[in-house]
């Protein structure tokens, strides 16, 4: 019997070509939602200036946000072509994928 679980690490991600923005955006949004990354992409997170005063729970939440942010950034970096990557450099965290 075939498994109904999808291994998202093996799902090919769409590459932005400049002519497929709307479809690329839709596919990435769906991917981010499926991986529970959409909130971090849409709203980001705020890192406190002083993390030494954080409780264990707050520190864990911050680590989770940093991990999700890095995961979303990695996906974005993998989905832009070489010309798109040059344009996106320095602005990737502000990309409007909503």
Image: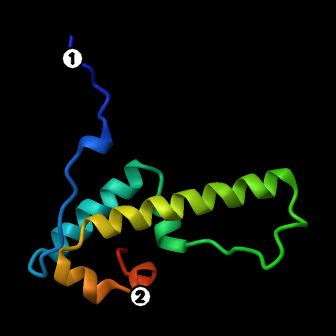
Q: Residue at x 28, y 25 (%)?
A: 4
Q: Position of residue 73 (x, y in %)?
A: 42, 67
Q: What number of labels is visible? A: 2
Residue underneath mark 2: 90
Q: Give the residue at mark 1.
A: 2
- Which residue is at the far right? 53
Considering only vertical position in the picture, is 47 above or below 84? above
Q: Are marks 2 and 1 in contact (CB under 8 Å)?
A: no
Asked whether residue 39 is in view, the answer is no
Residue at x-position 70% and y-position 61%: 62
Q: Secondary structure at mark 1?
A: loop
- Report the Cα–Cα distance between label 2 and label 1: 43 Å
Answer left or right for 25 relative to 76. Answer: left
Graded by Cα atoms within 10 Å as few (under 14), some (14 to 19) or many (20 or more), the crowding at tag 1 reads few
Q: Quadrant of the C terminus?
A: bottom left
Residue 72 vs residue 69: left or right?
Answer: left
Q: Residue 49 falls in which quadrant of the image?
A: bottom right
Q: Position of residue 28 (x, y in %)?
A: 29, 62
Q: Which marked residue is nearer to the observer: mark 2 or mark 1?
A: 2
Q: Using the image as rendered, state which of residue 78 and residue 35 is in the foreground.
A: 78
Image x and y of residue 33, in percent: 40, 54
């Amino acid at each position: 019997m075939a498994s109904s679980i999808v291994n998202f690490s093996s799902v090919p991600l769409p590459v932005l070509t400049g002519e497929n923005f709307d479809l690329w955006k839709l596919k990435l949004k769906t991917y981010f939602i499926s991986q529970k990354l959409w909130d971090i992409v849409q709203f980001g997170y705020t890192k406190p200036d002083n993390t030494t005063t954080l409780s264990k729970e707050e520190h864990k939440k911050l680590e989770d946000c940093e991990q999700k942010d890095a995961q979303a950034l990695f996906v974005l970096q993998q989905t832009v072509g070489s010309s798109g990557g040059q344009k996106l450099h320095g602005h990737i965290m502000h990309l409007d994928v909503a």
